């Protein structure tokens, strides 16, 4: 997501645009699939400051459905609300700005862009739409940072110091029966771990990063040599389900045949969608373990004892076969107490009466709607408030980034780099010296 550069359907002059008393952030969603829908629904569900003002989506039926739900709703779409590609929006916006600069009446422009395309398209979109722009607010979609549960957990660890110094962490993300992937399915969790243990409350303070990274995994079940009858693909897809995730995985055949012909539509349906992993050249792991190790850095900052920078170890387990699908859980051991958590509650135990239920202090975070245990809504709220603060002159970009987003570009990069380091460690059967790789 990137804050770009405003108020209703009326065409306004540049002077009227700049003199608006309070401008609501107007957002363009690029990609109206699962992610785009999740973020747009969060804006409506949470009653956020922002307005989903436009959509860019190549699949016509998806674009129209999204637009009716979140953009133009009951009426007919206007020219500034619907685009069949991000390039279409790019040319429209370029012409709009030229007309605005010439003093013509134009529709209000977009303040923020929510990029929800496939990963390989992100770079081209960001370079085209934001490459020559001044400094902007941005947010990477690590939604786990913004759920009520995880924000409470972080407060207990870093602000309240409920367990003292962290010694070790065990964190598990159970996946569904779909083949897991560390980068695609668990980058959120690696970022969550670094956010808990590296990124400080004081925005801008130097992070205490891991020193060593190792990883191991297995691919023992989803192979041609070991077919699992209980997970046979026809049992999963043969129920003629129409809701999630089928509606986002299977291409809209009506649009494909209309634009590219029946033969192409038939070819698409017989390529990859619905193929059994046991019948394909699947090379994705069934499970994976990542181990992160921190050196003692408690005196490196000022020469005095500095909390939160002691030695510690984290074990992250990505599990495919488990009853608790997508229900994250873990244990954090500290010098004074221990925290055990799952998706529903957080328990803080004292060591002297560990087996005594009365010794546990239980925290039950409020249940939030939407995906990632409310993280999608929290993420959109942070981004909306950051853009709102900038466009209405409340804060500059750096201040808004710190207050409402709480993430720097370096932090966003580090969590992805950590995933690649873990993959390098697994493939090379080695331990990665993180400090050498990033120093």
Image (cartoon, helix red, strand yellow):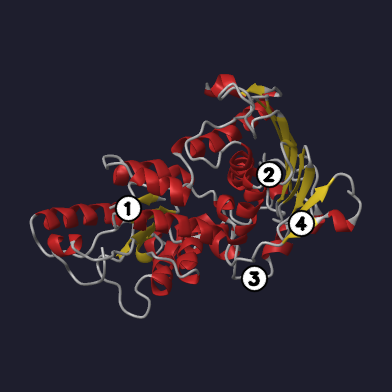
Which comes before the other along the chain, label 2 or label 1?
A: 2
Residue drawn at x 54%, y 37% as measured from the top left: 416
Which comes before the other along the chain, label 2 or label 4?
A: 2
Classed neighbour count for the residue bearing mark 2: other residues with Cα under 10 Å, few (<14), some (14–19), many (≥20): some
Quick one: SS at disc 3? Answer: loop
Residue drawn at x 70%, y 22% as measured from the top left: 430
Question: How many numbered badges does the structure rendering display?
Answer: 4
For marks 2 and 4, give the CA distance. 44 Å
Classed neighbour count for the residue bearing mark 3: other residues with Cα under 10 Å, few (<14), some (14–19), many (≥20): few
Residue drawn at x 22%, y 65% as measured from the top left: 20
Left/right of residue 160 with respect to residue 260 in the rendered view: right
Which residue, given by chain and number where applicable, does mark 1 sit on? Answer: 390
Which residue, given by chain and number where applicable, does mark 4 sit on? Answer: 231
Left/right of residue 270 with respect to residue 217 in the rendered view: left
Quick one: SS at disc 1? Answer: helix
Classed neighbour count for the residue bearing mark 4: other residues with Cα under 10 Å, few (<14), some (14–19), many (≥20): some
Rendering coords of residue 37 (x, y %) = 48, 64
């Amino acid at each position: 997501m990137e804050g770009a550069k405003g108020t209703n359907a009326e065409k306004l002059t540049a002077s009227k645009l700049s003199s608006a008393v309070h401008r609501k952030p107007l957002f363009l969603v690029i990609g109206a699939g699962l992610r785009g829908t999740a973020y747009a629904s969060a804006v409506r569900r949470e009653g956020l400051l922002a307005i989903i003002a436009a959509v860019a989506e190549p699949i016509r039926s998806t674009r129209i459905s999204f637009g009716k739900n979140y953009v133009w709703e009951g009426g007919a779409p206007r020219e500034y609300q619907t685009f069949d590609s991000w390039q279409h929006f790019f040319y429209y916006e370029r012409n709009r700005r030229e007309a605005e600069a010439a003093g013509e009446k134009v529709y209000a422009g977009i303040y923020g862009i929510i990029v929800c395309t496939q990963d390989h398209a992100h770079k081209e979109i960001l370079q085209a739409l934001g490459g020559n722009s001044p400094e902007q607010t941005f947010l990477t979609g690590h939604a786990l940072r913004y759920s009520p549960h995880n924000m409470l957990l972080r407060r207990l660890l870093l602000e309240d110091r409920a367990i003292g110094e962290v010694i070790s962490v065990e964190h598990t993300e159970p996946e569904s029966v779909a083949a897991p992937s560390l980068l695609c399915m668990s980058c959120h969790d690696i970022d969550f771990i670094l956010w808990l243990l590296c990124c400080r409350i004081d925005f801008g303070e130097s992070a205490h990063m891991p020193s060593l990274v190792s990883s191991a995994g297995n691919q023992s079940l989803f192979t041609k040599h070991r077919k699992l009858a209980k997970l046979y693909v026809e049992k999963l897809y043969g129920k003629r389900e129409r809701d999630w995730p089928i509606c986002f995985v299977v291409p809209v055949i009506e649009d494909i045949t209309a634009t590219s012909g029946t033969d192409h539509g038939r070819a698409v349906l017989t390529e990859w969608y619905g193929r059994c992993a046991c019948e394909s050249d699947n090379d994705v792991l069934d499970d994976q373990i990542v181990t992160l190790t921190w050196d003692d850095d408690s005196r490196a900052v000022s020469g005095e004892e500095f909390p939160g920078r002691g030695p510690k170890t984290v074990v992250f387990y990505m599990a495919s076969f488990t009853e608790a699908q997508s229900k994250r859980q873990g244990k954090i051991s500290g010098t004074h107490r221990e925290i055990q958590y799952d998706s529903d509650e957080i328990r803080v135990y004292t060591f002297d009466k560990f087996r005594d239920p009365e010794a546990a202090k239980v925290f039950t975070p409020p249940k939030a709607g939407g995906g990632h245990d409310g993280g999608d809504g929290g993420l959109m709220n942070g981004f909306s408030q950051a853009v709102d603060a900038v466009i209405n002159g409340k804060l500059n970009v750096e201040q808004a980034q710190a207050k409402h987003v709480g993430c720097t570009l370096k932090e966003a990069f580090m969590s992805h780099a950590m995933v690649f380091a873990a993959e390098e460690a697994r493939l090379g059967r080695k331990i990665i010296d993180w400090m050498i790789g990033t120093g």
